[in-house]
Image (cartoon, rainbow, N blue to C red):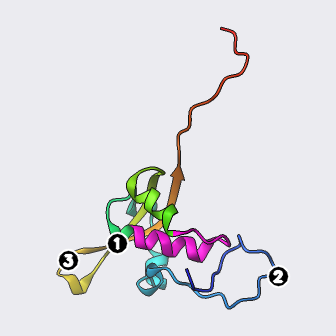
Amino acid sequence: CKADRISDAFPPEYTQKRDFVSEIHNYIDEKDIEHFSLDQLQVRPLSSKDELSQLQQLHCECFPVEYGERFFKDVWEGTLSSLVVVWEKPNPSANGKRSTFIIGCLLYEFKPIKAKNVHV
């Protein structure tokens, strides 16, 4: 990720230019925000390479740590499990089709617990 970032996750002394880099910022406007409702959101597994690309953009924009390609490959291949928060916006230029945008994500991994001195 070579873009500058914006996020409260960055320390206050972060001085680089803070630009939005996620694709959604090219499509959302004040009208969308004014009429936004939680029922417009879906929570589901990551389902396409386009969504993976959007997830990479969000990570670049929101986190001070740069996540490498291996991290996102693990997300795509399911080594790391994911649930994405998806917003679908009607796209007038696409004959009634909707544009899908990732606006959030939960990444997780299940690991076995190694019990020490457990008595049942």
Q: What residue does disc 3 label?
A: 96
Q: Which residues are magenta?
A: 52-68
Residue at (52, 83) in percent of width and height:
21
Amino acid type for the residue under numbered disc 2 = Glu
User: Residue at left 34%, top 72%?
Assistant: 50
Looking at marks 1 and 2 on the same chain, the residue that comes earlier in the sequence is marked by: 2
Disc 3, SS: loop
* Left or right: 3 in relation to 42: right
Q: Tell me which numbered mark, 3 or 2, is placed earlier along the sequence.
A: 2
- Residue occupied by mark 1: 50
Q: Is residue 88 visible?
A: no
Q: Which is closer to the viewer, label 3 or label 2?
A: 2
- Please give the residue where the numbered disc 2 appears in the rendered image: 13
Left or right of residue 50, residue 103 in this image: right
Whether pointer 1 and pointer 2 mark residues with C-beta atoms closer than 8 Å, the reply is no
Of residues 104 and 96, the one nearer the viewer is 104
